[in-house]
Image: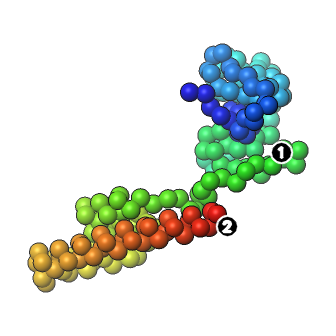
Amino acid sequence: MKENYCSSCGQEFGKEDLSIRCRLCLRNYHARCWEKTGGCTTWGCTGKPMLAQDIEYKRCPQCGEEIVSFAVKCRYCRSLLNAPPDAPQMLKPRIAPHESRKDPILTCLLNLVFPGAGYMYLGKMTIGLIWFIVACAAWFFARPLGLFAVYIWIMYDSTRKAFHMNKRAQSNKLS
């Protein structure tokens, strides 16, 4: 399947953009990026330019991989970088890294396996630990009936919290 972004600068291809595909590693490039780098920028690809020292590289601040210095998006983690002033404006990412979608079903199942793990999946470590302690106390004092009641409640509550977090992230994304 053809990638819809340039492997060098990370920008998506427009309808009118000329693109070049490396015959060896099958990576796609803007024609201007291919010319600017002198060939393929994939490490180890023999389509790589002979004068590699002429190309400046930098490290991605998110994942630490080495990318070309004029990249706007990291080709590995797809995070936006500080765009150079001559680069065209990019669209906002669909979901910001701190607003990732949480799966309510997975949240419920995690609580079923380990009481409080669903809260920990949602990023609420303290609440998850508290509910684990409550589940242990319920087992000690009320045996299966108390533990069953705690399980039902935390599965319901953590699933509800996951829905609310997703709804809040969706409304933040639209505004």
> Dot 1 lies on which element?
loop
- Which residue is at 16% across, 80% downward? 146
Instruction: Note whether 51 is above or below 93 in the view shown.
Output: above
Q: Is residue 34 above or below residue 66?
A: above
Above or below, 163 relative to 51: below
Asked if disc 1 and disc 2 are in contact, CB closer than 8 Å, the reply is no
Amino acid carrying label 2: it is Ser
Coloration of the structure image: rainbow
Q: Is residue 17 left or right of residue 44?
A: right
* Callout 1 amino acid: Pro
- Please tell me which residue is depicted at 61% across the width and 58% down the height of the picture: 96
Q: Is residue 110 above or below residue 87?
A: below
Q: Quadrant of the C terminus?
A: bottom right
Say which quadrant the N terminus sits in.
top right
Q: Position of residue 170 (x, y in %)?
A: 57, 64
Residue 90 seen in the current view? yes
Residue drawn at (81%, 49%) of the image: 89
Image quadrant of residue 86? top right
Q: Secondary structure at mark 2?
A: loop
> For the residues carrying marks 1 and 2, which lies nearer the camera in this image?
2
Drawn side of residue 73 relative to residue 137, left or right: right
For label 1, the crowd category at 10 Å Cα-Cα, with few meaning under 14, some 14 to 19 and many 20 or more, is few
Q: Nearer the viewer, residue 103 or 65?
A: 103
Per the image, the residue denoted by label 2 is 175
Q: Foreground residue, 32 or 41?
A: 32
Q: Which residue is mark 1?
A: 88
- Residue 139, how many percent across, how many down? 15, 77
Quarter of image, res 131? bottom left
Of residues 37 and 167, which is closer to you in this image?
167
Mark 2 surroundings within 10 Å by alpha-carbon count, few (fewer than 14), some (14 through 19), many (20 or more): few
Q: Distance from label 1 to label 2 (Cα)?
A: 23 Å
